[in-house]
Image: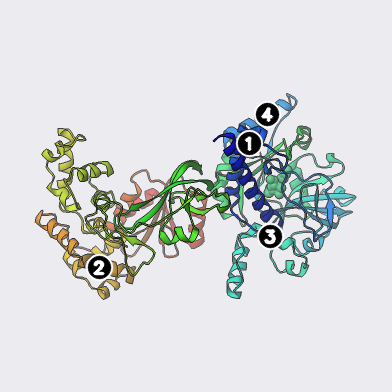
Amino acid sequence: MNKQQASERIIKLRELINDYRYHYHVLDESLMSEAAADSLKHELTQLEAEYPELITPDSPSQRVAGAPLAGFTQVEHSTRMLSLNDVFDEAEVMAWRNRIIKLLPENAKIEYFTDIKMDGLACALVYEDGQLVRGITRGDGFVGEDVTANIRTIDSVPLKLRKGKDVEKFLKGRTEVRGEIVMYKADFAKLNEARVKEGKPLFANPRNTAAGTIRQLDPGLVANRPLHFRAYDLQRDDPSDVPTYAYAYQAMRALGFLANNDATVLPDVKELMAFADQWETKRQDLPFNTDGLVVKVNDRQLYRRLGVVGKAPRGAIAIKYAAEQATTKVKDIFISIGRTGAATPVAMLEPVVIAGSTVQMATLHNEGEVQRKDIRIGDTVIVHKAGDIIPEVIEPLVKLRDGSEKPFQMPTHCPDCNTKLVKYKTEDAVWRCPNDACPSRAWKRIEHFASKGALDIEGLGEKNVIALINAELVKDPADIYTLTPADLLKLDRFAEISANKLVASIQAKKQPPLGRFVYGLGIRQVGTQTAVDLANHFRTLEAIAAATIDGLSEIEGIGEVVAESVVEWFSEPINQQLLQKFKTLEVQPQPVKHVGGKLSGQRFVVTGSLDSMGREEAGERIRALGGTFQSSIGKDTDYLVVGANVGAAKLAKAAKLGTKQLTEAEFLEMIA
Ligand code: IVH
């Protein structure tokens, strides 16, 4: 990007970030997630670092957040309410520790006071001789809004400090307690449920709702909304009254405040990182939202000595968990044809790192979604990725457009085989390529047929399937049984040994278990468990093929949509031909002789990794004994098999639902 282009981009980024900040901090509305805004700020700072001459004093990169609202009296804070610098990994924590160590006396013993970073709004409570006299919002850090009348309605704010053990000194003179006002996740959900019933617009998130509530001019309304104050700082005119943060928390609790019980003192960076790792999953079970930890030098004399840089103290940092959103540009939009013919628009992105991995493509789901969100080629977009889920485009940032963006046009024909795309009546949103012989579909169908959960044919992965299709050796899953070593040797990919091996592994799967075979056919709506249910109920392929919608609906767990899809698949001439071809080639799925078994009627979820087998195998063993293998824990789950490296959240959920937990050894005994 040259200087002229950088300058234009910087101006647009600043406008959008300023808009976001104004809505977020002043109007309590959220134009995008904090992570997405951070991502834009990051781009701005990088451009400004490249062209420092373009930095102006009004750039969001140079500013401290928040402006006081005009509706409340403005009050100056006794000491500035600061922010924290964010760090994201061990290296950055270590760099911080090395920086501060250099600034402190050699013999200084540094301990780290660590607490959960709550996602609410900061507030300072001023007490004179033990009585609450003022509650002030953070505002711009120097001046905040006097919201005392509203604060008084919060039950967890003591109107009078308690005469707890060893805290008499705080009851005399001026004591200031700072903390976070939060709305709990459960209360937020209830509030929104009620708003649905009342036909009112929904609140965006607990933080904004809490902030909006505290700035209501009517304290009566505030009293009806459940808010909580959780303390994190205690200040006195004489700083020696509070020697450490650990002491501050103890004293605040004795004075009647709620301070997180999980806050703790840790000796070094290694322990800090272990604590951060532990909370990355455990945080889901907290009543409020959090996106990280706060770490402060425990000794407040050392903390003060470290001073302030910009708007943040040197002696503290926030360790933030990886953001699940980022912004990037859409380079192109193409259509991916799935195994069942679904034509899915996919965005090709400029690579961006989200939650630790590089994302280059994101699903746009379907044509309607692209239109509804108005996503154009060339747009800067917000992309979301969490855990294993496929990344998706949340929305375009329309204000960053420069006019060069191109709207997306859904093709009318399959980009692969040029067949006209169609829609099925049951799912209006999805365009499909109806051509069963479409090369894209054929490739994905064969790959699926050979996959681990289906026939599990070793050596028949994506690349080999594509090579076989390109060489016109196969067109459908049945064709693989016609392959000879001589056919394979025509391809560069194969030598004698590998060709013999692949043919042998295909031939070894001529009598597959019925459930695996049915799953391998790739019928829409039929996953592994449904396939096994069909096999166990009907026993033979012929009986499944002849089943009616009523007959299918009798099976527990099979609804109308699945039943229709099964009937439709077996009635298509092309599929009937495929089944005939299997027969001619003597591929005979094994009829189910004996249903039931010792796990019959019992439902299992496996979490974490097992030493003795993979998840697929565990599922298969459970099914083979008549049990049901579920992918996530629910009310009807009977057993949770707990492997290694399991998050606390899963176990807590199981405990809450009363699901029996099994160790790997207990599970092995059960299936022995
Ligand atoms: S200690 C210098 N402890 O995070 C400020 N802050 O980015 C140090 N916050 O404005 C404050 N939970 O509102 C501290 N356990 C916690 C916190 C916490 C949330 C907020 C606080 C502050 C912001 C700093």
Using the image, tell me which numbered label, if any, was put on residue 568.
2
The mark that comes first in sequence, 4 or 2, is 4
Q: CA distance from mark 4 to mark 3?
A: 36 Å
Q: Position of residue 443 (x, y in %)?
A: 25, 49
Q: Nearer the viewer, residue 374 or 273?
A: 374
Callout 2 crowding tier (Cα within 10 Å): few <14, some 14–19, many ≥20 = some
Furthest-top residue in view?
A: 106
Query: Could you say which disc has been placed on residue 210 in the image?
Result: 3
Q: Position of residue 573 (x, y in %)?
A: 17, 64
Q: Is residue 350 above or below residue 619?
A: above
- Left or right relative to 581: residue 252: right
Pointer 1 local density, CA inside 10 Å: few below 14, some 14–19, many at least 20: some
- The residue carrying mark 4 is 99
Residue under label 1, please give it: 48
> What amino acid does circle 3 point to?
Ala
Between marks 4 and 2, how big is the CA–CA gap? 68 Å
Q: Residue at x 79, y 39 (%)?
A: 243
CB of mark 2 near ligand 1 (< 8 Å): no
Residue 337 in percent (x, y) is at: 32, 53
Label drawn at residue 605: none
Q: How many marks?
A: 4
Is mark 1 in CB contact (under 8 Å) with mark 4? no
